[in-house]
């Protein structure tokens, strides 16, 4: 009888330890705007979450909120800063003017692939050029799209003059100014709203990378594509500082081990592969694709693109920001990152 009681007491104690361990697990709410079924969500954010959970021995769990379900796309960074989300992934361009030095990476010619762009942006942060822009959160890793081109429903865009009067969804204010200088009418809206806007005739086309055409199903609606890489969209995955500080040293070590260049480049590789798949969709649909080689040296395209670069850097100088210094650092990182990308 005594032995039976001891055995039961031991079993109860073990069960209690299991319950305590489960209760000790910390759940981190992660918000972003990509569709849950997209390759971006599954191969970057879900993969990151699974790695963190595994390496923490189950002490960290990540609850995913895709498609802007926890915070709207243009509010995700603020949600991470304020603690509505523990982690947020978003485009810096959704909060115009807040990340002016970071957005230098969006300028034409800085990156030709998403892997290179992610490396450049992460390098600028690691070197301390962007510290002040993210002082209210704890960045985990940065990444970018591949170069974005112009995609339209009915207009075959071969030169900037072909954009005259077209309502084109712009990804950022920086790219929007360039579009406006080419004669287009820039229209701002979050990526998840593009499909409906095109269906309703609110916009005639958009500026987007191939990956986005696939992820947001825009290939279903456009027929003409102009590969003129006049911008690269940048992103940040960042964590609420208080949420990080509340973790145990062991949990923090897991987050730290899954931050920085490793995941930046992983994200870039996913975007590059999806760019290939997005373009292939357009090819198989029989769409018209125009490729503008070396746009910064192209007789039709170089002037508006170079003017756009100069205009942006001048505005940063007027704000007292070291725009040209960071631009030169970005170009230097671009060369180093290109070598890594090709290797």
Image (tube, rainbow, N blue to C red):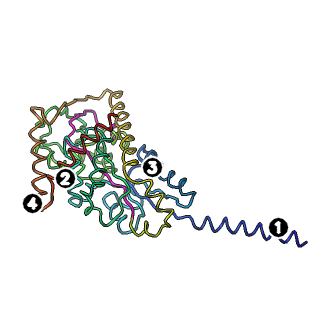
Q: Residue 158's spot in the image, x, y percent?
A: 16, 31
Report how far apart the C-alphas of labels 4 and 2 lie in the structure.
15 Å
Residue holding disc 1: 7
Q: Give the range drawn in magenta.
A: 218-239
- Eye-nearest disc, 3 or 4: 4
Q: Which of 269 and 324 is in front in this view?
A: 324
- Given contact means CB atoms under 8 Å apart, are the residues at marks 3 and 1 in contact? no
Residue at 25% from the left image edge and 58% from the top image edge = 130
The dominant secondary structure in magenta is: strand
Q: Residue 104's spot in the image, x, y percent?
A: 20, 50
- Given contact means CB atoms under 8 Å apart, are the residues at marks 3 and 2 in contact? no
- Quarter occupied by residue 111: top left
Residue at 29% from the left image edge and 48% from the top image edge = 197
Residue 245 horizontal side relative to residue 189, left or right: right
- Quarter occupied by residue 1: bottom right
**Residue 221 located within the stretch drawn in magenta:** yes
Q: Residue 18's spot in the image, x, y percent?
A: 67, 64
Q: Nearer the viewer, residue 172 or 333?
A: 333
Residue holding disc 3: 36
Residue holding disc 2: 326
């Amino acid at each position: 009888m005594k032995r039976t009681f001891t055995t039961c007491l031991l079993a109860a104690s073990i069960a209690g330890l299991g319950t305590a361990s489960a209760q000790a697990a910390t759940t981190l709410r992660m918000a972003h705007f990509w569709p849950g079924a997209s390759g971006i969500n599954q191969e970057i954010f879900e993969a990151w979450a699974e790695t963190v959970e595994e390496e923490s021995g189950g002490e960290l769990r990540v609850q995913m909120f895709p498609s802007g379900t926890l915070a709207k796309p243009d509010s995700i960074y603020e949600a991470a800063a304020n603690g509505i989300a523990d982690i947020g992934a978003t485009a810096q361009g959704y909060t115009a003017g807040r990340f002016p030095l970071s957005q230098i990476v969006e300028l034409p010619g800085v990156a030709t692939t998403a892997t290179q762009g992610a490396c450049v942006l992460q390098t600028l942060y690691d070197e301390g050029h962007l510290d002040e822009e993210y002082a209210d959160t704890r960045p985990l890793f940065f990444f970018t799209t591949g170069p974005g081109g112009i995609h339209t429903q009915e207009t075959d865009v071969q030169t900037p003059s072909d954009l005259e009067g077209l309502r084109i969804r712009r990804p950022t204010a920086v790219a929007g100014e360039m579009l406006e200088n080419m004669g287009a009418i820039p229209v701002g809206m979050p990526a998840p709203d593009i499909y409906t806007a095109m269906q309703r005739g609110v916009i005639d086309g958009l500026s987007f990378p191939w990956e986005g055409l696939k992820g947001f199903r825009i290939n279903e609606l456009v027929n003409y594509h102009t590969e003129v890489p006049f911008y690269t969209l940048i992103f940040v995955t960042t964590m609420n500082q208080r949420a990080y500080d509340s973790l145990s040293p062991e949990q923090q070590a897991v987050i730290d081990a899954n931050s920085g260049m490793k995941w930046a480049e992983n994200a870039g590789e996913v975007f590059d592969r999806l760019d290939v798949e997005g373009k292939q969709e357009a090819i198989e649909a029989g769409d018209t694709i125009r490729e503008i080689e070396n746009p910064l040296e192209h007789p039709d395209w170089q002037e508006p693109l170079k003017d756009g670069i100069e205009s942006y850097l001048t505005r940063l100088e007027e704000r007292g920001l070291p725009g040209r210094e960071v631009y030169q650092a970005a170009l230097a990182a671009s060369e180093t990152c290109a070598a890594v990308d090709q290797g």
